[in-house]
Amino acid sequence: MSSPFWSDIVARLDPYVPGEQPKLANLTKLNTNENPYGPSPRVLEAIAGELGDSLRLYPDPSGTLLRQAVADYYGVDLAQVFLGNGSDEVLAHIFQALLKHEEPVLFPDITYSFYPVYCGLYQVNYQRIPLGSDYRIQVADYLCSNGGIIFPNPNAPTGILLSLPEIEWLLKKNQRSVLIVDEAYIDFGGETAVSLVGRYPNLLVTQTLSKSRSLAGLRIGFAIGDVALIEALERVKNSFNSYPLSRLAIVGGAAAFADEDYFREVCEQVVRSRETLASGLKSLGFEVLPSSANFLLATCPSRDAVELAARLREKGIIVRHFRQPRIEQFLRITIGTTEQNRRLLDVLVELLKQ
Ligand SMILES: *Cc1c(COP(=O)(O)O)cnc(C)c1O
């Protein structure tokens, strides 16, 4: 479909397609990397406490309560923290504010598929840098002239983690443009690059409360970096939407950072389940990439991936498949509860017999 009323940009957009959110009950939903466990009870209490007459008032435009909670948690200044309506919104502002230059922004050939979409929206030049044959990001491949570098760490959808020394090496070698490290999955076994922010004014780290803090439905993301980078994001935000976070998101997000015990327990459980599921899949003949995230990217040498995803769906289990070179024979499987992972393995045993 198209229309003469559309702008040229809209006519040429190739929008991101999110994993489906089916309405059917009783599905084993392992397709969008949500946390299988609910948010901390303290988050629910904080949100309940905010429900009332105050909702007639706009929220704090800079979300100071949550911003301060993030700053305290990571030991940085308030002015080094930027909040957005999900980290997708934070990333959108980053592409517009910091990555739109003459030289192309660099990102891996296999990575978060929203990056090229933002490039289309904001008309940013980009260049894809192939992962190694082991599906790893090779930081030495990013030293060509560029208008910025962005990748998730751990990468998505591979789940493979870069070490902090590798990131610091790249920062030392690439001081003329910004490096964005998208840490959507860092809490499942990685080490955050926030500790490098004070020493590298071109480093910006983004995170989300959607995965490790079980709040995908509340829409909260943030960035931590040098004050000049944060100021650029504030300028875009205040030219777009002054109130990206609702009152409920601000108090709920702050409460999530106050319940460290719950957070750790949930992350540890997901990591344990990941290792159990990875061994289970390997024992069924799957090849599984080494994941530091809350999902696995795996391929079954004896079955076509699209076919296998369809068979799983018939059994009520949904996983994600990407129609993309190099990974078209892989499935991305979100770590579920112990019962969900068990059910996936049981169903696979059955399917692989046929
Ligand atoms: C899930 C995800 C995001 C977006 O998270 P939201 O905060 O829910 O918008 C960003 N980057 C990567 C790599 C992700 O997987």
Image (cartoon, helix red, strand yellow):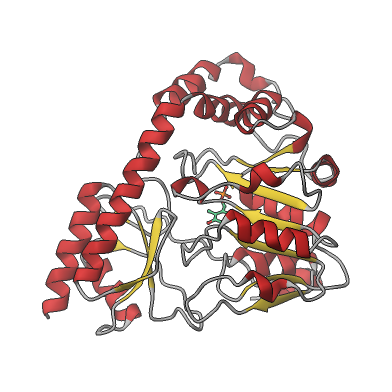
User: Can see residue 240?
Assistant: yes
User: 257 left or right of 337?
Assistant: right
- Please name whichever residue, 285 or 332, is drawn nearer the observer in this view of the structure: 285
Classify 159 as above or below 225. Answer: below
- The residue lying at 46 percent from left, 74 percent from top is 322
In percent of width and height, residue 61 lies at 75, 30
In percent of width and height, residue 307 lies at 29, 80
User: 218 left or right of 286?
Assistant: right
User: Can see residue 39?
Assistant: no
Classify 160 as above or below 230. Answer: below
Q: How many marks?
A: 0
Quarter of the view holding residue 277: bottom left
Which quarter of the rendered picture does the C terminus lie within? bottom left
Quarter of the view holding residue 1: bottom right
User: 142 left or right of 333?
Assistant: right
User: 42 left or right of 173?
Assistant: left
Quarter of the view holding residue 80: top right
In percent of width and height, residue 70 lies at 63, 31
Q: Residue lying furthest right in this view?
A: 102
In percent of width and height, residue 6 lies at 77, 69
- Please name whichever residue, 76 or 104, is drawn nearer the observer in this view of the structure: 76
- The residue lying at 35 percent from left, 40 percent from top is 37
- The residue lying at 48 percent from left, 64 percent from top is 160
